[in-house]
Amino acid sequence: MPGSWFLDTRPRRSRRGALTVVFAGVLATGAATGALGGEPTALGSVAPGSAAHGGTGRGAPVGDAATDDGKNTPRDPREARARGADLAELTVSRSGDRWSAAYTAREYEGLRQALDGSYVGVGISVRQARSAARNAEGAARRAGHGPAVTVDRVRSGSPADRAGVRAGDRLRTVDGHKVTGRPVTAVVALLRGSDPDAPGGAAAPGTDVTLRLTRDGKTLVRTLRRERLSTEPVRVQRLDDDVTRIKVGSFTRGSGEQVREALRSRVPEDGGILLDLRGNAGGLVEEAVTTASAFLDGGLVATYDDHGTQRALYADRDPRGGSGVERRPVVVLVDGGTMSAAELLAGALQDRGRAVVVGSRTFGKGSVQMPRPQPDGSVAELTVGHYSTPSGRHVEGRGIAPDLPVSGTGESLARARKVLSGLEARS
C-alpha cells in the first residue's frame, strides 16, 4: 500500500516512502456524543503515530461540549509562551487554518503514546446524562449545576477497577474540582492530570488522583494512582448466532490487525457484521486502510492530495490468506462523532458497494495535516491537502451521508440489524 503514514516529533521516512500526515478531530467528538471513553481523548486528538489522528486538535478552544463548533481559533501568543509552544503557536496563528494545531513537546509526546495505544490514567470512561446533555450549553455555565457526569465503563484490572469504582457511579469531584456540568473533555483532562481548560499532556504514572462519587445515595471517596494503560480500540460482541458487532473506538496502532483477527476467529462463516464506527474520531490512516483491507479484495480505498500531487491508498490482501469475509454482509454504523480516518473507511466501504451505511451524517473532517517540529521542541500541525472517497466525493465540510438515515443510538442499532438480516452473503 503506498502511503504508510507516520507522525512523530521528528519527521522520518516511511519504508514505503509516503507522507507524514495527521487528520485532526477528538474534542468535537465529545461534543457530538456527550461521552468520552478512554482517557487519552483529553489530549485533543486521539492520534499521532504511523499516520493520522482524529480530533479538533490541541489548538482548538475547549468549551462546553454543546457549544464547541470545532473551529480552531488562534491562541494568545502569551498563552503559548506560558505553555512552552511559542514557535508552534506562532506558526499556527499565521496559517489561519481552522484545523492546524500547536503542541508543546510534552503534549506531542503524549499524543504519540496515545497513537501507540497507551495513555496515563485510571481506566474509566465518563458520560453526561443524555437528557441533560441536550441542554448542556446553558447548564455548564452555572457552577455546580447541569448535566450529571457518570462512570460509563471501568476497565478491568485498572486502578479504578481495583478501587471498586463501578459503571453507573456518579462522579462529583476530581481532586476537589466539581465536575457536574463540565464537558466530558474537561473531566477526562482532570482524571489524566492535565489542565481542564486546555487539555494537554497527562501527569506522570504513579501520581495520585482523588475521586468523590455517589452510589445509591451514598458518598464514596477513592484515591487512585495513575498508571500507563493500553487502549482497547476494538471490541467484539456476538449479538446472536448470525450477527457480530465490531466496535472500533479509534485507529491506534495495531487496531486494523485486531479487526482482521476478529473476522478470522470470532465471526461465524457467512455471519453478518455490524462495523460500529459511531464516536470514532479517527486515528492512524494506515490502520483505517488495514481495516478496509479486511473487508475488500484489494482496490482503491481513498485518494488524497499532497501539496497538489494526487496520491492513492489501496487495500492490501490479507497476508495470512483470505477468510471469505469479503462475502459476508456488512452494515456500518455512523453518527456525528464519526470523523476523519473513520469517515475515510465508511466512505470506502460505501462507494465500493461493500456495506450499507446506517445512522446520521458524519462530522466532515477530510483535510490532511502534517507535523512540523519547531526549533524550541514544539510541534505545529498544518493542513497540506484533502482526501476523497473512491468515487471522488470530498468529505471536508460535508461528511458521509448514510444510505439509511436514522437518529438515536438504540434505533440505529435496531435498524442496522434489520438491514443486515435482509442482506445475503455473496456467492
Image (cartoon, rainbow, N blue to C red):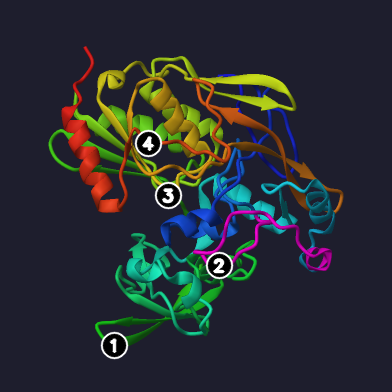
Q: Residue at x 51, y 64 (%)?
A: 65
| Helix, strand or loop for disc 3 | loop
| Helix, strand or loop for disc 1 | strand
Provide the major secondary structure of the magenta segment: loop
Q: For the residue carrying disc 2, how many other residues have a C-alpha within 10 Å: few (<14), some (14-19), or many (20+)?
A: many
Amino acid type, label 2: Ala
Looking at marks 4 and 3 on the same chain, the residue that comes earlier in the sequence is marked by: 3
Q: Nearer the viewer, residue 276 or 414?
A: 414
- Residue range of the region highlighted in magenta in the rendering: 58-81
User: In front: mark 4 or mark 3?
Assistant: 4
Horizontal and vertical percent for residue 362? 45, 42
Horizontal and vertical percent for residue 372? 77, 42
Q: Is residue 165 visible?
A: yes
Which residue lies under the disc numbered 3? 279
Are the residues tagged 2 and 1 within 8 Å (C-beta)? no
* Residue 189 badge: 2
The verdict on residue 188 being magenta is no
Looking at marks 3 and 2 on the same chain, the residue that comes earlier in the sequence is marked by: 2
| Helix, strand or loop for disc 4 | loop
